[in-house]
Image (cartoon, coloured by chain):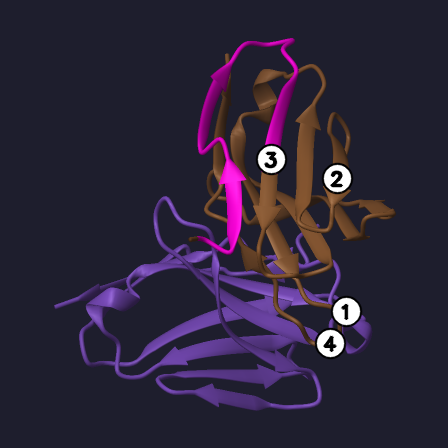
Amino acid sequence: DQQVKQNSPSLSVQEGRISILNCDYTNSMFDYFLWYKKYPAEGPTFLISISSIKDKNEDGRFTVFLNKSAKHLSLHIVPSQPGDSAVYFCAATWGAQGGSEKLVFGKGTKLTVNP
Amino acid sequence: DADVTQTPRNRITKTGKRIMLECSQTKGHDRMYWYRQDPGLGLRLIYYSFDVKDINKGEISDGYSVSRQAQAKFSLSLESAIPNQTALYFCATSDTGPFQPQHFGDGTRLSIL
């Protein structure tokens, strides 16, 4: 029973274009969502997050959108750069107001940005 | 220097052996976590600790044990390793308080023959 789903194992985009990575969740208790980026031979690096009281959070080239009614979130990268090529993990947790505990991760989407 | 350091980075061992993976952090965080990643899968939580005296089981704790020796140190043990414990293991830390992201080490690649 996968609570966080990333249905696209891979995505390829051209440099300068928009990358859109999608994530769906099933647990209505989730109240905090995060995106992590992972390069080979390195640990996941925190990228951006959003709490359930918001529907958008932006940080530079990265924007996360949350649609609670659809239980869907997406990460937009504009413009995409070759250095963005990595595996992106969506993660969710609950009870975050009191401090995040257990993160539930999706399987990841491998993004390739072609020069 | 890395904020979250895992040792060893790679380990090959045999079935039945006892193995300890170590994690140390300089971030001053109270909360520490151990995750496991298998090919094509996301990370799954093994154990987590909110302080030295507080240790909790995660989603997949069977076959593993942990020790929180100090605020900065959290070790994961496999008492009798088996081949299906071959995986990539990550340690993470987070600060106390609302909406705090977890910060990960670079992982330990463990192979059990």
Q: Name the residue under label 1.
A: A94
Chain A drawn colour: purple
Instruction: Verify CB contact (< 8 Å) between mark 4 and mark 3.
Output: no
- Identify the element where label 3 is drawn: strand
Q: Mark 3 points at which residue?
A: B22
Q: Mark 2 points at which residue?
A: B69
Few, some or many residues within 10 Å of mark 3 (<14, 14–19, 20+): some
Residue B80 placement, left or right of A113: right
- Identify the element where label 2 is drawn: strand
Chain B drawn colour: brown
Instruction: Verify CB contact (< 8 Å) between mark 3 and mark 1.
Output: no
- Place of residue B6 in the rendered image (x, y in percent of width and height, measured from the top left): 52, 40
Residue extent of the magenta highlight = B2-22
- Identify the element where label 1 is drawn: loop
| Dots 1 and 4 on the same chain | yes
Is residue B76 in the magenta section? no
Chain at tag 1: A
Q: Distance between the residues labelled 3 and 1?
A: 28 Å
| Dots 2 and 3 on the same chain | yes
Chain at tag 4: A
Query: What's the mark number on residue A31?
Result: 4
- Place of residue B106 in the rendered image (x, y in percent of width and height, measured from the top left): 46, 46
- Identify the element where label 4 is drawn: loop
Marks 2 and 3, the one that precedes in the sequence = 3
